[in-house]
Image (cartoon, grey):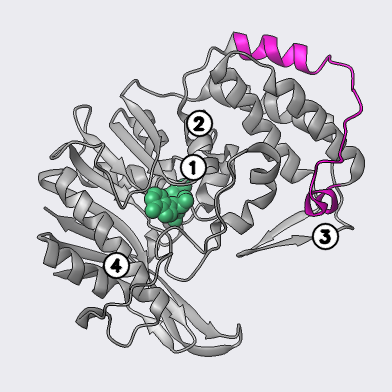
Amino acid sequence: MIIEKKPEIGKLVTFIPNKHTPVHNWFYYKEGFSRDFVELIIKHLNLGKDSWVLDPFCGVGTTQLTCKEIGVNAVGIDIAELPVFVSRVKTADYDVNVLKEISQKIFSEKFKRQDLSGLSSFIKKAFPRHVLEDVLFFRSIVEKIEDKVANGFFKLGLISAAIKASYIVKDGGVLKIIKDRNTPPFRKFYKNRIKRMIKDLENFKTLSPKIITLKADSRNLDFLSDNMFDAVITSPPYLNKIEYTKVYRVENELFFENTEPMLRSYIGDRVKEESDFRYEGLPAIAKAYFEDLRKVLLEIYRVLKEGGVGVFVIAQGVFPTGVVESEKIFSEIATEIGFQTEKMWLVNRRVATRDRVVKIGYAEEYVIFIRK
Ligand SMILES: C[S@@+](CC[C@H](N)C(=O)[O-])C[C@H]1O[C@@H](n2cnc3c(N)ncnc32)[C@H](O)[C@@H]1O
């Protein structure tokens, strides 16, 4: 097995390049990777219009949307409601004239005072009062848009605009409320955002492969047939890193009914008692994480075609006791299931710290290629 150093890909496995990419940037998802990474892998694997790609941890749909641009069929799966919603909105087909008509109507509605009594104190603290009233007012209007596709479009614009106009600052895995932040005038801001999103659609070129996004738990993919996919392109949740549900608390509370249970992450949420030689000496959280990844890999093995390739972005985990070499454990598990680890690209190397200041080594990030 070959390990190649590819620092030039380091940035591409982050969401940062998407910030300036139309449609991909409709919702900022810190955990995401970039469209350019997905494009690079699609080309590297020579995938074409008859190929099927699976992303079992699809987040906000970077894989599906890039596949739509390039003309490759794709299925994306995520367990959480918010990213599934964002994926669907970004990959939907729109009639721009319908959106323009609805936009005109929405922004000519006269403001009606909103009842804030049902909101949590957290939400009330997260916004200037007049902004919160405006957000709720537009939420009530958007809820009434009958065209389901258009409804999602205006809802996503509203979610992003609301966060921008709030006191919320997302700092790593925590939400901070910064009251002296300058917040933009909400109505104007939301209107401009919708205008820009419509313009994005006018300039955004896509083809028409089949694109599907499902809300499900990838530890069990029994709704997918055997030998269906040519490739998997994905980045599983990082070991011991981001607290997904906390960071998106405002979005979930204000815009979705079924908020997810407050778990650390959906992979590794149950710590297993049984010991396993591979996991010896690992923190309990890491054991549970790899046990769950194993379940997902078993499913991926089943749904991949013979000769199909899985491409995974995997970072080492940082614990007070030291750095866990996730890529090695991942590759061992994959080999045991029947995959062959073909190569790894070392794409990032960051200083790993304990208590934010004490250096305990380096944490590396890899792109791992495994073949069935
Ligand atoms: C690192 S993010 C992937 C981001 C994605 N590459 C993108 O560009 O948006 C990992 C995702 O896995 C999802 N997830 C966690 N556990 C899951 C599970 N058991 N099944 C499906 N998705 C899961 C999380 O909700 C999160 O969106």
Q: Which disc number belongs to residue 60?
A: 1
Instruction: Tell me: 298 left or right of 170.
Output: left
Lower sequence index among marks 2 and 1: 1
Quadrant of the snapshot with the N terminus: bottom left
Query: What residue is drawn where x is 24% and y is 65%?
Result: 344
User: What residue did someone put label 3 on?
Assistant: 178
Q: Residue 62 in magenta?
A: no
Task: Kindly identify the amino acid type of the residue bearing the numbered disc 4.
Answer: Glu
Lower sequence index among marks 4 and 2: 2
Q: Residues within 10 Å of mark 3 (few under 14, many from 20)?
A: some
Secondary-structure class at tag 4: helix
Residue 48: name its quadrant.
top left
Lower sequence index among marks 3 and 2: 2
Lower sequence index among marks 4 and 1: 1
Task: Kindly identify the amino acid type of the residue bearing the numbered disc 3.
Answer: Ile
Task: Work out how far the residue at label 4 is from the one at label 3, CA to CA, in angstroms.
Answer: 39 Å
User: What residue did someone put label 4 on?
Assistant: 291
Q: Are marks 2 and 1 in contact (CB under 8 Å)?
A: yes
Task: Work out how far the residue at label 1 is from the one at label 3, CA to CA, in angstroms.
Answer: 26 Å
Q: Is mark 1 within 8 Å of ligand 1?
A: yes
Q: Are marks 1 and 3 in contact (CB under 8 Å)?
A: no
Secondary-structure class at tag 1: loop
User: What residue did someone put label 2 on?
Assistant: 90
Magenta span? 98-127
Q: Position of residue 96 (x, y in %)?
A: 58, 13
Task: Work out how far the residue at label 3 is from the one at label 2, CA to CA, in angstroms.
Answer: 30 Å
